[in-house]
């Protein structure tokens, strides 16, 4: 942090000097007008209106809430009038006051939203609204994604590039090594649990960044998924409430309340879920001797509970600077019971049978506090951000079976400090320089206790990580092309009772986007990425997850790196849009969980290892088409070849292509009803040690607006068609075929209602903490 102080002082030392007005008594006039937003015709209040001579301010005013301004006692002469407000392009024009023009009425002046030197294509309508910007794809949340979804997890699973497994883990283009951010910041707790606690109504947009620029933390080999929560942009009081109920004890509720007046804005949002899910599964293990096999049947009930709240305050110091602060809490409480029956056979004869029950419980909470300052200059901007994240998690497991008793408990806590300074400046009217520094300090600890057959083991470990980085990017427009090049430096130290990992590395990035027409882009991008080991992968411990599986730490584990290349094409035409990408990810020291059977202990030993090299070569297609006025289809398919250099296990067959496909179909029915169909189909996919079988599912949702459009009724059937998850894993000494099924179908009904003023007026501002970096 000591390196940040001189840079911070340098950045905030900028000042604005004002010229002295030339006062000529008796020769003054008035300049007035009204400022509106170009895209919506809403008034822009509190915008800065300045009259300049020789690029120096002479006099000026702020617009009122109705967008009007009037500058009196302006000395005769010719001036440049400049109108600025955060989030809009600066308006400039020339005005002259003399004896024949004592009062100049400029009428209505419109401000256009700023584009930050980045060309983009926007696809909007009944379908999911999509924006293609340099280096990222932005999906704005709407009914197609939120309908029938009780959490952000459900909504993400409808986006073509993103997949979510049965446990809520997110993958991007088939790779689970993805960095998931909420409002531009990572979660120190289990991301799957945090996403389940977030209601879809709280999200404004999802940013899919497969090749992030050097401005971003390089964590995540397959890229970044940034979930940006909503910020209130409406004057006055407004909000919403919602509630839902599902078959077999499933309940959820959410609400928000927002107030904005003058320079202040306050918002509060919260949600809670309480559910019950039935699960069942089985596995069949065939040993290499050809005569022995192990068969297990299991079923269980899960009771997850989640809650979330966020309180946010914005204060607009003036028309070019704002201070924002928020506190957020995500919490979860999970309890489950299970029963199993296990049979060991040899040459078809029953040798041993075990019948048992188990209980699992976990609970955790993550609390984040963040303060942000943003200042716009004439040709640049400064942003300061500081956050603290504090949390804890507790996990307990207990199994009791014939001749077998086992229990374990795991507790962990963390405190994370993160500070960041970003500055950008446009010079020569065509170059944009972005630079910044970031420091992250993680202080965590864990305590573990496990008991097996009356023998108890306890152990605990500290974990400290410090990461400091600096970056610069340079952007320019060359004809119809936008070019952005960047470089990031990072130094990281990870230690426990002794140093574990220390490295310094450079992460370059390059983005080129060629505009081929009003609504068509061609792009190329490159970035270098990293995958840092998780805390529980590297500590010197052995945790028994259950009587048959032991997780073993690996202190020799090193970070994984990838070089990612991508070429893309996107277009939006009347009635349809299309996006296509060809990509390659070449990775070294890739981290994968490898399972080996210990014959002496009779258990599976699971350890994360570096498996040398992998390569992904893929094609990603997505788009939408309006077939009629009442029928729209959107979706996509991802096809990729996964090649890995790891000789520990030889799979019996080669699957050249892994693939996944999704489709969202919207039907506009009479009486304002809408029917939404979400379907997915996964092909047979290969991994380092396993092959996953075909999987498919279909969800249906029926929506109906009520109460003059302020309310909405929704009825849904999740997993209406569902075949479960099947896979075959190849171990040293045996092969295991496994099937897992979740409850289906799940029937739900929900109601939501919006209240208060629903039209945006005045300020429009993309505030950090709403999360986007670009």
Image: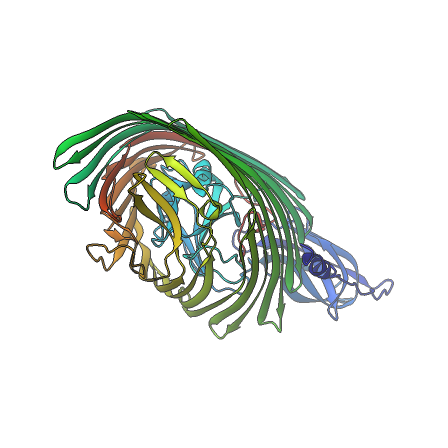
**Figure coloring:** rainbow
Between residue 179 and residue 69, name the one nearer to us: 179
- Furthest toward the front, the residue is 600
> Quick one: which residue is furthest to the bottom in this view?
479
Q: Can residue 245 be seen in the rendering of this structure?
A: no
Of 405 and 359, the residue lying toward us: 405
Residue placed most toward the observer, 582 or 94? 582
On screen, residue 3 versus residue 292, left or right, reads right
Q: Is residue 773 visible?
A: yes
Location of residue 621 by image quarter: bottom left
| View extreme (right): residue | 25
Q: Residue sitting at 12 percent across and 37 percent down?
A: 347
Left or right side of 431 for 271: left
Total count of labels: 0
- The reply, left or right, for residue 301 in relation to residue 322 is left
Percent across and percent down for residue 698 are 26, 41
The N terminus - image quarter: bottom right
| Residue at screen point 48% across, 64% down | 119
Residue found 26% across the figure and 37% down from its top: 740
Residue 23 placement (x, y as % from top left): 85, 64
Q: Residue 520, image x and y in percent?
A: 39, 65
Determine the image quadrant of residue 276. Answer: top left
Image coords of residue 647 (percent x, y): 29, 59
Nearer to me, 588 or 383: 588
Give the residue at x 18% y 38%.
293
């Amino acid at each position: 942090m000591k390196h940040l102080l001189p840079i911070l002082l340098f950045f905030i030392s900028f000042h604005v000097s004002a010229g002295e007005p030339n006062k000529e008594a008796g020769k003054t006039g008035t300049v007035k007008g009204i400022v509106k937003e170009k895209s919506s015709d809403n008034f822009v209040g509190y915008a800065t209106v300045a009259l300049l001579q020789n690029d120096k301010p002479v006099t000026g005013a702020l617009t009122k809430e109705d967008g009007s301004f009037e500058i009196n006692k302006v000395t005769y002469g010719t001036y440049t009038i400049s109108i600025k407000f955060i989030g809009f392009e600066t308006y400039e024009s020339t005005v002259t006051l003399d004896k024949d023009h004592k009062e100049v009425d400029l009428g209505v002046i419109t401000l256009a939203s700023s584009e930050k030197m980045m060309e983009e294509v926007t696809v909007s309508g009944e379908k999911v609204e999509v924006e293609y910007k340099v280096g990222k794809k932005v999906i704005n949340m709407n009914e197609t994604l939120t309908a029938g979804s009780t959490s952000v997890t459900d909504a993400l699973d409808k986006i073509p590039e993103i997949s979510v497994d049965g446990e809520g883990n997110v993958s991007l283009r088939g790779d689970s090594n993805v960095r998931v951010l909420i409002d531009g910041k990572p979660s120190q707790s289990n991301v799957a649990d945090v996403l389940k606690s977030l209601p879809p109504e709280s999200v404004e947009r999802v940013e899919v960044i497969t090749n992030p620029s050097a401005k971003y933390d390089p964590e995540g080999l397959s890229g970044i998924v940034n979930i940006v929560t909503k910020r209130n942009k409406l004057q006055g009081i407004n909000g919403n409430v919602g509630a839902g109920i599902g078959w077999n004890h499933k309940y959820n509720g959410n609400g928000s309340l927002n107030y904005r007046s003058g320079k202040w804005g306050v918002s509060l949002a919260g949600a809670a879920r309480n559910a019950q899910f039935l699960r069942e599964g089985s596995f069949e293990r065939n040993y290499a001797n050809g005569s022995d096999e192990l068969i297990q049947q299991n079923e269980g009930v899960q009771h997850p509970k989640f809650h979330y709240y966020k309180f946010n305050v914005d204060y607009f110091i003036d028309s070019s600077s704002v201070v924002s602060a928020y506190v957020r809490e995500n919490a979860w409480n999970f309890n489950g019971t299970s029963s199993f029956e296990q049979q060991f056979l040899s040459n078809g004869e029953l040798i041993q049978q075990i019948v048992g029950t188990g209980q699992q419980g976990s609970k955790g909470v993550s609390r984040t506090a963040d303060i942000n300052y943003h200042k716009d200059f004439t040709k640049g901007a400064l942003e300061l951000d500081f956050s603290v994240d504090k949390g804890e998690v507790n996990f307990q497991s207990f199994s009791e079976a014939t001749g077998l008793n086992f229990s374990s408990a795991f507790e962990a806590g963390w405190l994370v400090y993160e500070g960041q300074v970003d500055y950008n400046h446009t010079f020569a009217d065509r170059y944009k320089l972005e630079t910044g520094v970031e420091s992250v300090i993680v202080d965590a600890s864990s305590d573990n206790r496990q008991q097996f057959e009356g023998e108890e083991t306890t152990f605990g470990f500290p974990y400290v990580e410090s990461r400091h980085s600096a970056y610069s990017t340079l952007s320019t427009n060359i004809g119809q092309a936008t070019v952005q090049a960047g470089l990031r430096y990072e130094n990281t130290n990870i230690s426990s009772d002794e140093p574990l990992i220390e490295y310094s590395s450079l992460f370059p990035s390059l983005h080129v986007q060629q505009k081929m027409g009003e609504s068509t882009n061609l792009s190329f991008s490159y970035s270098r990425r990293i995958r840092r080991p998780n805390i529980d992968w590297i500590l010197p411990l052995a945790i028994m997850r259950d009587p048959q599986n032991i997780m073993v730490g690996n202190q020799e584990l090193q970070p994984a790196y990838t070089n990612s290349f991508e070429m893309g094409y996107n277009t939006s035409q009347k009635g349809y849009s299309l996006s296509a990408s060809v990509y390659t990810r070449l990775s070294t020291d890739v981290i994968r969980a490898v399972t080996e059977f210990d014959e002496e202990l009779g258990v599976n030993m699971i350890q994360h290892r570096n498996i040398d090299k992998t390569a992904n070569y893929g094609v990603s297609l997505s788009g939408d088409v309006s077939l009629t006025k009442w029928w729209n289809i959107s979706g996509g398919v991802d096809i990729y070849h996964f090649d890995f250099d790891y000789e520990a296990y030889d799979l019996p067959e080669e699957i050249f292509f892994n693939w996944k496909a999704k489709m969202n179909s919207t039907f506009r029915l009479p009486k304002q009803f809408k029917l939404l169909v979400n379907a997915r189909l996964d092909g047979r996919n290969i991994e380092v040690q396993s092959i996953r079988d075909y999987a498919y599912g279909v969800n249906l949702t029926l929506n109906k607006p009520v109460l003059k459009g302020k309310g909405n009724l929704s009825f849904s059937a999740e997993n209406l068609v569902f075949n479960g998850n099947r896979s075959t894993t190849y171990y040293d000494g045996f092969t295991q075929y496994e099937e897992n099924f979740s409850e289906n179908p799940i029937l739900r009904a929900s109601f939501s209602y919006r209240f208060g003023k629903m039209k945006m007026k005045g300020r429009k501002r993309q505030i950090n903490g709403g999360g986007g970096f670009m």
